Amino acid sequence: MNFFSHIGRYLMMLKGMFGRPENSKLYWKEFIHQCAEIGIGSLGIVCIISIFMGAVSAVQAAYQIVNPLISKVIIAQIVRDTVILEFAPTLICIVLAGVVGSKIASELGNMRVSEQIDAIEIMGINSKNYLIMPKIGAAILMIPMLVIIAMFLGILGGRLTVAASGVIPTDVYDKGLMEFFKPYNVFFAMVKAYTFAFIISSVPAYFGYYVNGGSLEIGRSSTKSVVVSCVLILLADYILAALLL
């Protein structure tokens, strides 16, 4: 029953977000602020992870291809497909679930414990619409952009690695990137990115918005939101792969 209670409150929270803003300029300012927090604030960790992600993929692909009959061009194809299909959308979003999700949950949880949300509602403002909607909108806008950057940097990291190690010439790597490329893979990765962005923003917002207790519960709700978000991301990853591939 507790499980269905959480689902019901989560759906009611999403329903309560939609409404006409009382002050459009104030909402727009909050939306831009959240875009900066989610996008620019997470850019550094995304860049670092993406470059090493592509580098490790290239090294492992070169290590596994020991048959001289197999062309080394396939190394670039393995790096390209693994980065686009799985590493960039899924791994990056799992990291963002910890970075962005914990921040959203702790921010809303602190506002709930300090009774700031109650004060907003007393003033006649829809707190769900004002506090949660800009966060979800900013995440849906910025996280797919971060995934695109991760794709580019992951492939670039693989190229830098093969160039530094001398496994294959860079022109062969570039040729492999172009061979048998399927644009549908990018479409599939973006579908996953938008789905994961919604999970990363809405689930922590739910746990933070409905915090009960004192400051100790803020940390617990933040941790719980990250765990639940990661599980839902992996579940959604499997479902989307089964449906779209």
Image (tube, helix red, strand yellow):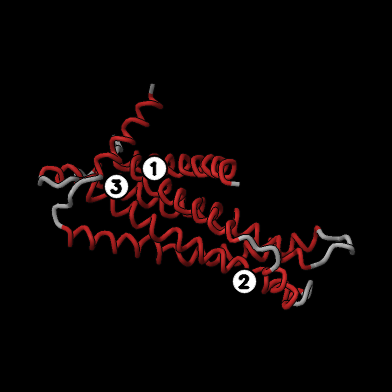
Q: Position of residue 133 (x, y in %)?
A: 28, 50
- Kindly identify which residue carries mark 2: 156
The numbered mark at residue 203 is 1
Residue at x 46%, y 39% (from the top left corner): 228
Judged left or right of residue 91, residue 107 is: left
Q: Position of residue 8 (x, y in %)?
A: 33, 30
Judged left or right of residue 163, residue 51 is: left
The numbered mark at residue 60 is none
Is the residue under label 3 in contact with that under label 1 (CB below 8 Å)?
no
Judged left or right of residue 207, residue 59 is: right
**Type of amino acid under label 2:** Leu
- Locate residue 213: give its quadrant: top left
Sooner in the amino-acid sequence: mark 2 or mark 3:
3
The numbered mark at residue 108 is 3
Q: Classify 55 as above or below 171.
A: above
**Type of amino acid under label 3:** Leu
| 31 or 110, nearer to the observer | 31
Outermost residue to the left: 123
Front: mark 2 or 3? 2
Q: Position of residue 182 (x, y in %)?
A: 63, 60
Q: Residues within 10 Å of mark 1 (few under 14, many from 20)?
A: many
**Type of amino acid under label 1:** Val
In three-dimensional space, the C-alpha distance between marks 1 and 3, rounded to whole angstroms, equals 12 Å
Sooner in the amino-acid sequence: mark 1 or mark 3:
3
Secondary structure at badge 3 equals helix
Residue at x 82%, y 60% (from the top left corner): 65
Residue at x 38%, y 21% (from the top left corner): 1
Secondary structure at badge 1 equals helix
